[in-house]
Amino acid sequence: MLTQKMTTPISTGFLLTALLSGTALANDAIGPGDSDSKWVLGGHVGVMSNPYAGENEDGFLMPNVEYRGERFFIKDGEMGYSLYQGEHFSAGAVLTGQGSFLSDKDDYQDNAKLAGLKERDGTLDLGFYVIKDTDMGRVRFTFLEEVTGEHKGRSADLKYTFAYQANKLNVNPFVGVNWTSADKVDHFFGVSSAEATADRAAYKGDGSLNVYTGVRGRYEITKNWDVSATAAYVHLGDGIRDSSIVDEDHVLVGTVGVNYNF
């Protein structure tokens, strides 16, 4: 979901998605704090800490293109299709991509702690989501399975986004928990016997339960223009932290952006 050097396979947007408040369900792609525009174009800049050994922070530039159709939508790196819409509940199918800092060896070959690791191909994950609207915000559950034949892993994500509004300012705290299967962790954080060295132990990935929290703010400058900012914290589970190529137990993300709504 991010165009940057490092995209961890943990939902936090996985990180930064949010969904609708109110009494009636309007659109699965419109979340708490979002405008009701059908198209959104813009961009975000930010910084993200890198949990891989020997790495620090990565800055990134992230274009933002959203289409919010009545059934089909593109948002936050996902393509989705709403299959059922009720007054407070909806469900649908979703397709998303997953990448890794290890996707290109040129990004880490100068890092002695990572040099020699094989590249990890990106994947596509297909699954379903269910959404429940409440008086305070929205809860979203997503289950995904890898479909490109790289690792056959699965993941599940449960997130609650709160909705607060004061005139043109929208503030949306969120909390969530993400489960990533052993096969998926192994693909992105595992170390084979061929990759092991005297300073880098072999590691077979194990399932990981990761928790996260954060807040997103959006201010409407005009009817069409808005600015936004997001900060998030992800606590990595043991399955990821135990890898010999990981030396952090968390990921921090911060972004600011500008969007045009039409």
Image: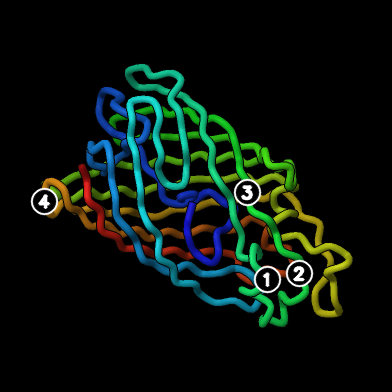
Residue 24 shown left or right of residue 224 in the figure: right
Question: Local crowd at mark 1 within 10 Å, few (<14), some, or many (≥20)?
Answer: some
Q: Are marks 2 and 1 in contact (CB under 8 Å)?
A: yes
Residue 178, located in which quarter of the rendered image?
top right
Q: Between marks 3 and 2, how big is the CA–CA gap?
A: 25 Å
Q: Are marks 3 and 4 in contact (CB under 8 Å)?
A: no
Q: What element does badge 2 sit on?
A: loop
| Residue 105: mark | 1
Viewport quadrant of the C terminus: top left
Q: Nearer the viewer, residue 141 or 2?
A: 2
Q: Between marks 4 and 2, how big is the CA–CA gap?
A: 49 Å
| Residue 117: mark | 2
Q: Nearer the viewer, residue 239 or 195?
A: 195
Tell me which amino acid carries mark 1. Answer: Lys
- Total labels: the figure holds 4
Which mark lies nearer to you, 3 or 2? 2
- Mark 3 vs 2, N-terminal side: 2
Tell me which amino acid carries mark 4. Answer: Thr
Which mark lies nearer to you, 1 or 4? 1
Q: What element does badge 4 sit on?
A: loop
Give the residue drawn at x 66%, y 40%: 146
Picture coordinates of residue 165 (x, y %)? 19, 44
Q: Which residue is mark 4?
A: 222
Q: Which residue is mark 3?
A: 209
Give the residue drawn at x 75%, y 54%: 186
